Amino acid sequence: MRFMMLMIPKGYESATPGTLPDAAAVTAIMKYNEALQKAGVLLALDGLHPPSMGARVSFEGGKPKVTDGPFAEAKEVLGGYWMIQVRSREEAIEWAKRCPGGPNEIVEVRQVQEMSDFPADVQKAAEGFEKIQSAAARKEHA
């Protein structure tokens, strides 16, 4: 089972461009990342720049509209993620509990949808998805 653990740092929604974690926080999180890797459960991980450097594309009326960050209505935003593969939701939660997060951080654990989770008609509509997914993974590792 694949799970995404989403880091949600409180206050990051209003962080200025270029905001970065300090060396002590990075040292602690690197030990955690190495533990995930040594356990063989880590598939991917990345940190994200603050929303002030991002953009949102909405589709009201079917037409794309671009809004540059920061986003006034945002209450929680992602600061980064880990993609892990474990045997159960409980194991994913145990890994999230080991994260050296501070008092202003939350780790949300979400299971990744697998094609087998969908009914046959949805699987048929998504034919070719796994081919696209594996090509993207190969590009990421190239």
Image (cartoon, rainbow, N blue to C red):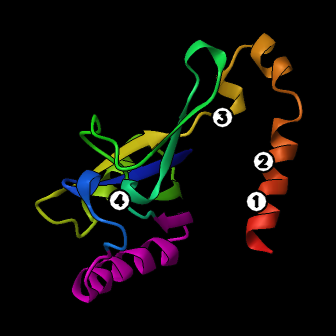
In this view, the residue in front, 17 or 46, is: 17
**Amino acid at dot 2:** Gln
Query: On the image, numbered disc 3 is attached to which residue?
Result: 114
Query: On the image, numbered disc 4 is attached to which residue?
Result: 95
Q: Residue at image x 51%, y 75%?
A: 37
Q: Which residues are magenta?
A: 20-47
Query: On the image, numbered disc 2 is attached to which residue?
Result: 133
**Amino acid at dot 1:** Ala
**Image position, residue 113 (x, y; %):** 60, 33
Please name which of the two marks, 1 or 4, marks the residue nearer to the observer.
Answer: 1
Q: Which mark is residue 1?
A: none
Q: Quadrant of the C terminus?
A: bottom right
In this view, the residue in front, 103 or 3, is: 103
Q: Could you tell me which secondary element the residue under label 4 belongs to?
A: helix
Q: Are marks 2 and 4 in contact (CB under 8 Å)?
A: no
Say which label, 3 or 1, has the lower sequence index: 3
Q: Could you tell me which secondary element the residue under label 1 belongs to?
A: helix
Q: Quadrant of residue 131?
A: top right
Residue 105 relative to residue 44: left or right: left
Q: Are marks 1 and 2 in contact (CB under 8 Å)?
A: yes
